[in-house]
Image: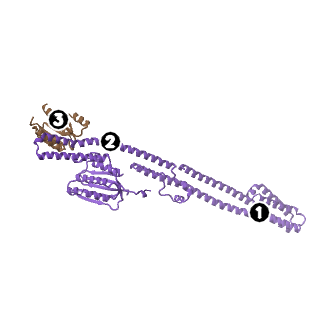
């Protein structure tokens, strides 16, 4: 269900609840008013009935003839009052009670009418009158008491009803606000996270089912109730659609990134071709010149000279062979043969391989390897190649007395390890810095192929890592490699 | 023919060495340099007939050498050699009024013929 539907549904529920509460409150108040009106009428009637009983007593004791007339008048008045307020009374106490009240009044009136105002009442008549009067008053009293109790009951019930409704409305409104704040904010957070990941170049699909990281107390309570799955996220709602849109965008970006990488590769092939032409041109020219000079000067050359020429030809061939090898490494990047490894061990192994170069360079080497680093999933040989390349570069840039430090540490997000190779050598001029990873870029005169850092860059990229350089002229250069910490498949969830 | 003075500037030391070996046999005086700066210093001391310079070098490159030499000593011939064998650099070199241009690898006898032609003008 879409969130807008959920909100509409929840709001409709709230409005219905409010309307229902209002309706019942109104009905209860109406009923209450009816009952109170009856109680008012009943009070008047009861007062009349009491006076009638007093007049009755006067009649019996003093044979006061006017007393009978009084009773008759009062009864007629009461009857009239009852008839005029019949609707109210019927509504308050029901038709049966009304009829009984009316019939009791009628019976009393009949008995009173049968008494002769001139003659003294017989004992039998006296008891009839007393009985009818008492019956009428008792019944009226009883009904009045009953109605007073009813009024109290209605008030109490209304109070409970109103309180319950208020609680339900609050509960439902809180639910809606939790739905809005919890679900939507969580989704926005998730979207923000994904957008950030995309901006970092991670085009992995995100989960379309979003869960609030810190659900509110209400949500926590509700999550235990099955029927409240209403408030849970749903891949088919708006946020699900946004997630789907972002996923498809991310897929497109991934495709485009691949295209860009492809075109970058093509562009670098262009640079590469020009570079190859230049790089191969020099040793080829050297061989060619030596061969020509060898033929031309053959008779003038000593045996040593001739051997020297041929050795140099061989050296130049080696130069070509190295260029071709590096080229092959670049054009056909070997699929990394990755295994779990401890980066500190790889650093130590690489250092052993360049030990000889370090000892003759007369530079000071400092090693800081952090303990307890997460395992990395790497091709040990390739990473070793990168490290040796960086260390060799640093040694070549350094002069006697310079320092070289190699350090490993946990990355800022604790999801990657960092390896730092830092020298206090001459540094790289700022205008060269953006090109250090370009193919055939070299500052090492004729001794470098300009492919070392380029190949290293490719290797680190293939490991989903990152390599960056910081350099200050005269202060030294620092290369930092980031490699993702290895997460085993089982724990990836 | 003898006595003509040539300077060779190339960071590949074999180039200078081979030109020196083959040209001195024919009576040229050849001095070789691995970069442009000391060669230009040498030019200030003495005049040379021909400068053979590599195009792509660290520091002062071949185009800069050409500009300075043509300004300081217009009679000196400048021949550019380069392993950067694209047409763009050839056109650029010619536009800069270079006397001749040799993409690497080249034939020593072609270079000799070119120098002979330039010097006989």
Task: Tell me which colouring the rendered structure shows.
Answer: by chain
- Residue A396 seen in render: yes
- Residue B40 seen in render: no
Q: Nearer the viewer, residue A263 or B68?
A: A263
Give the image quarter of residue A482. Answer: bottom left
Q: Residue B2: horizontal and vertical position, in percent?
A: 9, 36
Pointers 1 and 3 within a single chain = no
Can you say whether B4 is above or below A178 in the image? above
Q: Are marks 1 and 2 in contact (CB under 8 Å)?
A: no
Q: Residue furthest top?
A: B121
Task: Label 1: state its secondary structure.
Answer: helix
Task: Label 3: state its secondary structure.
Answer: helix
Q: Nearer the viewer, residue A229 or A450?
A: A450
* Alpha carbons under labels 1 and 3: distance apart: 145 Å
Mark 2 lies on residue: A267
Mark 1 lies on residue: A46
Q: Are marks 1 and 3 in contact (CB under 8 Å)?
A: no
Q: Earlier in the sequence, mark 1 or mark 2?
A: 1
Q: Residue A284: horizontal and vertical position, in percent?
A: 21, 42
Dot 3 crowding, Cα within 10 Å, few <14, some 14–19, many 20+: few
Which chain did the image draw in purple?
A: A
Chain ID of residue with mark 1: A
Q: Nearer the viewer, mark 1 or mark 2?
A: 2
Identify the hue of chain B. brown
Task: Give the position of the C terminus of chain A as an image quadrant.
Answer: bottom left
Q: Residue A304: horizontal and vertical position, in percent?
A: 12, 47
Q: Residue at x 17, y 35 (%)?
A: B110
Task: Label 2: state its secondary structure.
Answer: helix
Q: Residue B85: horizontal and vertical position, in percent?
A: 24, 38
Mark 3 lies on residue: B110
């Amino acid at each position: 269900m879409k969130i807008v539907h959920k909100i509409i549904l929840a709001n409709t529920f709230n409005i219905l609840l409010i309307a229902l509460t209002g309706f019942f409150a109104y009905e209860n108040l109406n009923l209450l008013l009816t009952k109170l009106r009856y109680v008012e009428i009943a009070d008047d009637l009861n007062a009349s009935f009491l006076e009638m009983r007093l007049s009755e007593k006067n009649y019996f004791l003093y044979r006061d003839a006017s007393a009978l007339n009084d009773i008759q008048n009062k009864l007629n008045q009461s009857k009239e009052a009852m008839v005029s307020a019949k609707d109210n009374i019927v509504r308050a106490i029901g038709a049966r009670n009304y009829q009984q009240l009316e019939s009791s009044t009628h019976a009393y009136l009949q008995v009173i009418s049968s008494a002769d105002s001139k003659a003294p009442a017989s004992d039998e008549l006296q008891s009839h009158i007393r009985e009818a009067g008492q019956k009428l008053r008792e019944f009226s009293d009883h009904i009045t008491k009953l109605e007073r109790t009813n009024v109290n009951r209605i008030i109490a019930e209304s109070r409970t009803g109103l309180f319950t409704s208020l609680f339900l409305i609050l509960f439902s409104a809180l639910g809606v606000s939790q739905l809005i704040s919890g679900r939507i904010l969580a989704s926005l957070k998730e979207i923000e996270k994904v957008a950030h990941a995309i901006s970092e170049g991670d085009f992995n699909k995100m989960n379309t089912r979003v869960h609030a990281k810190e659900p509110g107390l209400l949500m926590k309570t509700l999550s235990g109730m099955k029927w409240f799955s209403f408030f849970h996220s749903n891949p088919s709602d708006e946020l699900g659609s946004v997630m789907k849109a972002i996923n498809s965008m991310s897929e497109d970006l991934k495709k485009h990134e691949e295209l860009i990488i492809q075109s970058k590769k093509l562009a670098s092939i262009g640079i590469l071709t020009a570079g190859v032409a230049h790089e191969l041109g020099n040793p080829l020219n050297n061989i060619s010149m030596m061969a020509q000079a060898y033929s031309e000067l053959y008779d003038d050359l000593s045996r040593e000279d001739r051997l020297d020429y041929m050795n140099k030809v061989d050296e130049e061939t080696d130069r070509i062979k190295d260029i071709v090898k590096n080229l092959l490494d670049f054009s056909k990047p070997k699929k990394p043969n990755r295994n779990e490894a401890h980066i500190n061990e790889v650093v130590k192994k690489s250092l052993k391989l360049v030990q000889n170069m370090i000892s003759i360079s007369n530079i000071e080497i400092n090693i800081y390897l952090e303990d307890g680093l997460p395992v990395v999933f790497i091709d040990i040989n390739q990473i070793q190649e990168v490290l040796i390349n960086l260390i060799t570069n640093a040694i070549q840039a350094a002069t006697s007395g310079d320092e070289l430090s190699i350090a490993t540490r946990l990355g800022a997000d604790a999801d990657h390890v960092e390896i730092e190779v830092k020298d206090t050598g001459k540094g790289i001029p700022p205008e060269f810095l953006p090109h250090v990873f370009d193919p055939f870029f070299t500052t090492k005169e004729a001794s470098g192929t300009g492919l070392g850092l380029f190949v290293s860059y490719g290797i680190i990229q293939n490991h989903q890592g990152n390599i960056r350089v910081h350099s200050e002229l005269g202060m030294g250069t620092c290369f930092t490699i980031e490699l993702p910490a290895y997460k085993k498949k089982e724990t990836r969830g | 023919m003898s006595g003509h003075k040539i300077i060779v500037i190339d960071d590949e030391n074999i180039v200078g060495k081979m030109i020196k070996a083959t040209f001195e046999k024919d009576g040229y005086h050849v001095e070789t340099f691995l970069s442009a700066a000391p060669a230009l210093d040498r030019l200030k001391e003495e005049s040379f007939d021909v400068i053979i310079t590599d195009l792509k070098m660290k520091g002062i490159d071949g185009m800069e050498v050409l500009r300075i030499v043509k300004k300081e000593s217009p009679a000196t011939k400048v021949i550019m050699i380069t392993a950067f064998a694209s047409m763009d650099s050839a056109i650029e070199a010619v536009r800069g009024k270079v006397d001749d241009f040799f993409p690497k690898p080249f034939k020593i006898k072609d270079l000799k013929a070119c120098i002979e032609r330039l010097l006989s003008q």
